[in-house]
Image: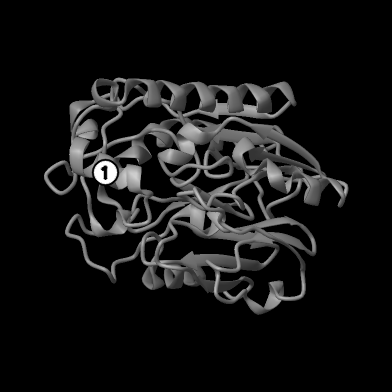
Amino acid sequence: MGTLRAVNVSNEWSKLHDAFIGIGDEENCVHPTYIEALKWQDAEGLRECEEFGGKRAIDTTPEDVRALGRQLDSLADLLAGRGIEVRRSIPLRHPEEIHFLDEVQKGYVNHDGCDFFLTVGNNVILLNNLRVTCRRKRVWAVRSVLEAVLKGSNARYVAMPPCSPHYSEDDSYLERGDVLMDGFNVFVGCSGNASSPAGIAWLQQFLGPQYKVHTVPLHPKILHLDTVCMLNRPGLLTWYPEFVPELPMPLRHWDKIEVKKLPGEDEAFGANGLMLDQNTIILAEQYGRLAPEYEKRGIECITIPFDAPIHWGVGVRCAVGPLHRGD
């Protein structure tokens, strides 16, 4: 038997070996109709839900959706140029997938590679139970690509039990954008807009007593933990104190780079960077003001245009789903 492909992620900063990245998918991109879990959006996003919900973005905001695709492609090219194995999600192929649960909520964007699977150690968890109903169909844009890679690997592959199409606050929701890891400490954000207490409890039960899953309460205008908190390397984190009321005990004594939401910034994505290794970070260029803080700590800071994905709720870290980190 040949060598198994390595699948393992145990932290946020070890050398990144591979990356799943979404696509623009201009033909299928549809503005979501509004539900309460979208209240974190900026004023422009809320207006678009009201005015364009259920309509194709290529027909309403064509330049925005084209910029979304271009900036995702540029990120993929940057990672590939640094020797990272890049895989892209695929367009939905069947009408049943494209219109899945449209009677509950219309909308579709295929831009993030991260929220549809979670790698903890060598456990790969398929996540098909996102809180915003129209996002759940996107698992089919990732699943076939993901499962082809997992064949011949050391992965333990499972799917989280799906939530009901009928929305309720207390169903089991779990989204990878809420999950940060430092070894056997797993931190999961809970804002009421994404992961739920029931989903967090399921993760703890699945991972077992070797892991400690910490719930991190978030401000209710925040989508995911990874937009307002980032673990850069052992003992160093970046965070927005105004949106994370209290850090979990294992993180309280870490060195901290503080980010504040500036006047005119509609969204808080300054802590949503991607660590390529513990000495290299990619940031959206609108948060380039943080570069001196990283550089004085010996971290190379690469800034890229990423305003279009951020407008759709996807920062640089959100866009990338890893299967293997290791030095």
Q: Is 139 situated left or right of 273 in this image?
A: left
Q: Position of residue 4 (x, y in %)?
A: 67, 38
Q: Is residue 273 left or right of residue 50?
A: right
Within 10 Å of the Cα at label 1, are there few (<14), some (14-19), or many (20+) other Cα atoms?
few
> Is 208 placed above or below 11 here?
below
User: Up-down: is 196 above or below 326?
Assistant: below
Residue 80 pos. (x, y %):
67, 23
**In the image, is 31 to the left or to the right of 297?**
left
Query: In the rendered view of the protein, which quadrant contains the N terminus?
Result: top right
When the figure is inspected, residue 172 is found, relative to residue 132, above or below; the finding is below
Which of the 4 image quarters holds residue 39? bottom left
Residue 3 in the image: state x and y as whole percent.
Answer: 72, 35
Q: How many marks?
A: 1
Residue 275, quarter of picture: top right
When the figure is inspected, residue 236 is found, relative to residue 300, above or below; the finding is below
User: For this rendering, which residue is in front, 278 or 151?
Assistant: 278
- The answer, for residue 32, to whether it is visible in the render is no
Q: Looking at this rendering, what residue extends furthest in the bottom direction?
A: 249
Locate residue 174 relative to residue 273 in the image: left or right: left
Which quadrant of the rendered structure holds the C terminus?
Answer: top right
Q: Which residue type does callout 1 highlight?
A: Arg
Q: Identify the secondary structure beneath mark 1.
A: helix
Give residue 177's position: percent from left, percent from top.
Answer: 50, 53
For the point 18% across and 44% down, the residue is: 101
Residue 308 visible, this orientation: yes
**Residue identifier under label 1:** 47
Residue drawn where x is 19% and y is 31% of the image: 55
Here the colouring is one colour
Q: In which quarter of the image is residue 28?
A: top left
Residue farthest along the front direction in this orientation: 263
Q: Nearer the viewer, residue 301 or 287?
A: 287
Residue at image coords 79%, 64%: 235
